[in-house]
Image: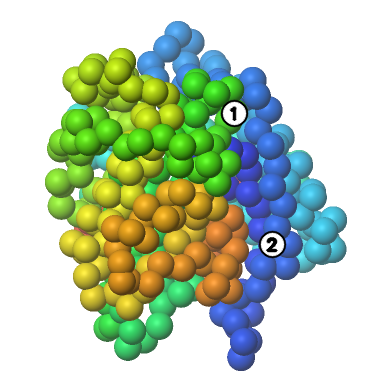
Amino acid sequence: MSGTSLDGIDGVLVDFTPTAEARLRVLAHRHGPLPAALKAELLALNRSSADEIHRGALAANALARSYADVVAALLAAAPVSAGEVVAIGCHGQTVRHRPGEFDGVGYSIQLNAPALLAEWTGIDVVADFRSRDVAAGGQGAPLVPAFHQAAFGDTGRALAVLNLGGIANLTSIDAGGRVVGFDSGPANALLDLWCAESTGASFDAAGTWAATGAMDARLLASMSDEPYFALPAPKSTGRDLFHRSWLDRHLQLADAGRLRAEDIQATLAELTASTCAAAVRRDAAGAAELIVCGGGSRNDDLMARLRRRLAPLPVVDSDERGLPAEQVEAAAFAWLARQFTDRQPASLPTVTGAAGARVLGALYPAR
């Protein structure tokens, strides 16, 4: 999995054989870097630019090479042979996400080269998870709520799961097992962007820089007026909306030239905390606890802001529920691949708005 935050590639090797102690076991986890030039190209390809088809194809090939390196590291760490692995679930890198737009169907595009990955690893690859749901009238996102239910769901007890990746998405599971999920807004995408431009660091480790700033009410109010936040579910978003031009517009509206860079970072953190908290209060009001996963769960400042806004609701990271935060999304796509190989539906119409549950993915057989 390489997500919206573009902070690298997470791979997990998962055994889904249930035991008395666990529903799944992560046998190995490896994180691989994205080469700087590839990361810059992927960011650029999120916006219209020259020669996109050629550049996108080459970026997909480069991604496949990085994915193959992570697969090799996982197999060596386990150790497990390629022949023992049923399939690789490979999401690819989203560069455009516009479901339902333009012609009534829209699209969601992930750069990927699954045929290359199958060739280089000798393992079947399942990819293209979103398009089947989009074809059925759905958002094609978020896809992780079905896995959140499978991994964390507790019959008779309502709970919520919040993934803080580049974009934040919320899963609400009521006491009867009904699932609602949607993208609530930006998480690390804008925080990382502003930190990189202001400090040269690719991210604000533990949120220590944001913690030195002062939240600005005027800027927060301007950003909070974004119409997306008020839309009902199903809904999904990404860098198509929350990008540098969006931030620039609100910085101008709020006369942010009067602010220190760290004050803007603090306000971006408060935007994520406030929009996530509002989503929890509105759509997961009966939850007994909020489980947080994704890279944002390691941001102590962001977690503190979230806990303040949601008190007295218990807010825990997914490590406390048996699955480390940085492994959850990669494990979700392993689960999606397993659902495909078993020909079981993996989409939830209550989440994406599709006409019905669908088997998601396409198979690229190994040699």
Residue 213, can we see it? Answer: yes
Q: Residue at x 63, y 43 (%)?
A: 9
**Residue 125, horizontal then vertical, whole percent:** 62, 51
**Between 100 and 210, the one nearer to me in the picture:** 210
Q: Residue at x 30, y 53 (%)?
A: 276
Q: Which mark is residue 346?
A: none
Amino acid tagged 1 = Ala
Asked if 277 appears above or below 157 in the picture, the reply is above
Label 2: element kind:
strand
**Residue 230, horizontal then vertical, whole percent:** 14, 46
Q: Earlier in the sequence, mark 1 or mark 2?
A: 2
Amino acid tagged 2 = Leu
**Within 10 Å of the Cα at label 2, are there few (<14), some (14-19), or many (20+) other Cα atoms?**
many
Residue where numbered disc 1 is placed: 201
Residue where numbered disc 2 is placed: 13
Asked if 91 appears above or below 223 in the picture, the reply is below
